[in-house]
């Protein structure tokens, strides 16, 4: 699943990942130590999640690290993880392998 940062915010992106992982709001909330109501409010835009909550939900949704930056940006936070292009010179040995 590829995430595109949009003007709609983090809620629809999180909902997309949750649906792709086939989890209910209640299942995700229990795994993340939150309430189903809070997850619902985040997904619908009624509540702005903290940076920690975005990362916790992403972790329990098994969102790839590169995509977590997109979630953070959509929620209004700075990216947390450095990205290295695959054609970067320092990855030459890896590509040759």
Image (tube, grey):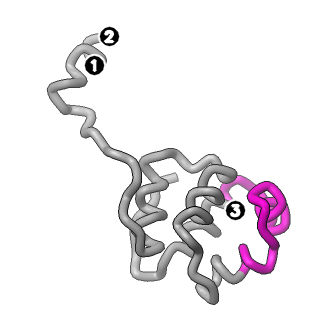
Residue positioned 72% across, 73% down in the render: 39
Q: Residue 90's x, y, as percent?
A: 19, 24
In this view, 16 is above or below 45:
above
Image: magenta residue range: 19-40
**Label 2 Cα crowd, 10 Å radius (few <14 / some 14-19 / many 20+):** few
Depth check: give the residue in front, 10 or 48: 48
Rounded to the nearest angstrom, the CA distance separating label 1 from label 2 is: 5 Å
The reply, left or right, for residue 23 in relation to residue 67 is right
Q: Residue 59's x, y, as percent?
A: 62, 50
Is there a contact, CB below 8 Å, between mark 1 and mark 2? yes
Label 2: which secondary element: loop
Residue under numbered circle 3: 19
Residue positioned 62% across, 59% down in the render: 17
Rounded to the nearest angstrom, the CA distance separating label 2 from label 3 is: 36 Å
Residue under numbered circle 2: 97
Residue positioned 84% across, 67% down in the render: 26
């Amino acid at each position: 699943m590829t995430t595109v940062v949009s003007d709609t915010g983090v809620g629809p992106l999180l909902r997309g990942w949750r649906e792709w992982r086939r989890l209910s709001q209640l299942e995700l909330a229990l795994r993340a130590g939150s309430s189903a109501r809070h997850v619902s409010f985040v997904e619908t835009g009624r509540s702005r999640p903290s940076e920690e909550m975005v990362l916790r939900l992403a972790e329990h949704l098994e969102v790839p690290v590169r995509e977590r930056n997109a979630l953070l940006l959509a929620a209004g936070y700075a990216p947390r993880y450095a990205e290295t292009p695959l054609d970067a010179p320092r990855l030459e040995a890896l590509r040759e392998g």
